[in-house]
Image: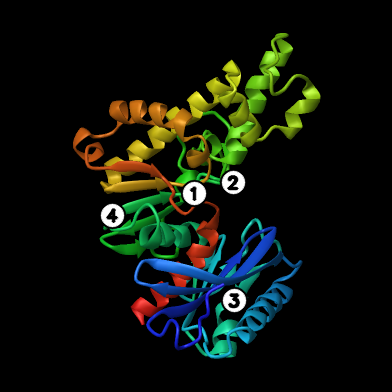
Amino acid sequence: MPDVGGGVFPKMTLVAAVDIGGTKCAVSLAVVEKDSVVFVDKISFPTPSGPEMAIGEICASLDTMLLRYPDRTPEAIGISCGGPLNSQAGIILSPPNLPGWDQIDVVSPLRERYGVPVGLQNDANACALAEWRFGAGKGCRHMVFLTFGTGMGAGLILNGQLYIGVNDMAGEVGHVRLEADGPWGYGKAGSFEGFCSGGGIAKLARTMSLQAIQEGKPPSYCQTMDDLSSLTAETVGKAAEAGDSMAIQVYETVGRRLGQGLAMLIDVLNPEKIVIGSIYGRQHKLLEPLVMETLREEALTFSLDVCEIVPAGLGEQVGDYAGVSVAMEMLSNS
């Protein structure tokens, strides 16, 4: 692990990154120089039952890591967390995956304890910053990042800046309805999130598999009614890779709906790049031809011709990079 003492990385910026999730939290230390990041330490732990315990554990983890590097202190701390939240006030506002986190100020305790700038962003915005600064969107001025994981959300980089809207609600593309009926997601049947998320793919596969089982033609990945409840997007994806016709049909539907959603973003925002996380990277070979075929049918040609659609570049470390990027944003805006 690199030495971050003052004599070794004198021109590098040391920052702390905090990733608050519904099941686990992580605290990292990283040194940053231009577009290069080196993670020097990390502590992960299951998300405690209440916000006070979680904030205490975050501080204890950061204290433990800083004891290993007594010559340096972080210049900023960045926090990535699921929304809704108020990034300007540093307050988390009742995220669905964090029960009990109602009007919780996570910024002030860290700012008062460590005496450095502390920033908070929702996870989609933080990951957009990460992919823009360090990943597949590096060098862009107009970029859209789509989560395409458990849910479907977007982070928007417009004119070289993160765009969050009036109250941090910009980029909630998962709530847009693509079809009058379809898998339920983000409070709507047939929404973008309903078709294009891990949960949505599982729901779509259950509906199609149930009908096939009732017709006596069960798919390979779901042979009986008992298998329906355990279906996941990953299970269906592996079956599609193995050639199961119904699994392929599920992902064909997903690919076309993803293309439909991307066409909307391309027509409205005219970005130079759309970076898509999680499931798109894992099923890129299957999804890309369907997405591009749909885009050629649906999007404005002049806008599509200047937009590149790519998988996210940071992989499983995007959550760590997200917090680092929020911290760097605080320093660049200070």
Residue at image mark 2? 150
If you read the primary sequence from the N terminus, does the residue marked by circle 4 or circle 3 appear first?
3
Q: Badge 1: how crowded within 10 Å, few (<14), some, or many (20+)? A: many
Residue appearing at x 42%, y 79% in the figure: 13
Mark whose residue sits in front, 4 or 3: 4
Q: Say which amino acid is labelled 3.
A: Val
Q: Secondary structure at mark 2?
A: loop
Decide if residue 114 is on the left or right side of residue 13. Answer: right
In x, y percent, where is residue 44? 67, 66
Mark toward the viewer: 3 or 1: 1
Q: Which residue is mark 3?
A: 106
Mark pair 3, 1: CA separation: 23 Å
Residue under pointer 4: 142
User: What residue appears at the point 73 percent right and 9 percent down from the top-left corner?
Assistant: 216
Q: Pointer 1: what residue?
A: 147
Q: In the rendered structure, which amino acid carries the disc numbered 4?
A: His
Q: Please, is residue 151 above or below residue 294 in the view?
A: below
Q: Nearer the N terminus, badge 3 or badge 1?
A: 3
Is residue 40 among the parts visible in the rendering? Answer: yes
**Disc 4: CA contacts within 10 A as few (<14), some (14-19) or many (>=20):** many
Relative to the observer, which residue lies in front, 311 or 94? 311
| Distance from the alpha carbon under mark 1 to that under mark 4 | 17 Å
Q: Is residue 179 visible?
A: no
Residue 169 picture location, percent across and down: 45, 58
The amino acid at mark 2 is: Thr
- Residue type (three-letter) at the residue carrying disc 1: Thr
| Label 2: few (<14), some (14–19) or many (≥20) C-alpha neighbours in 10 Å | some
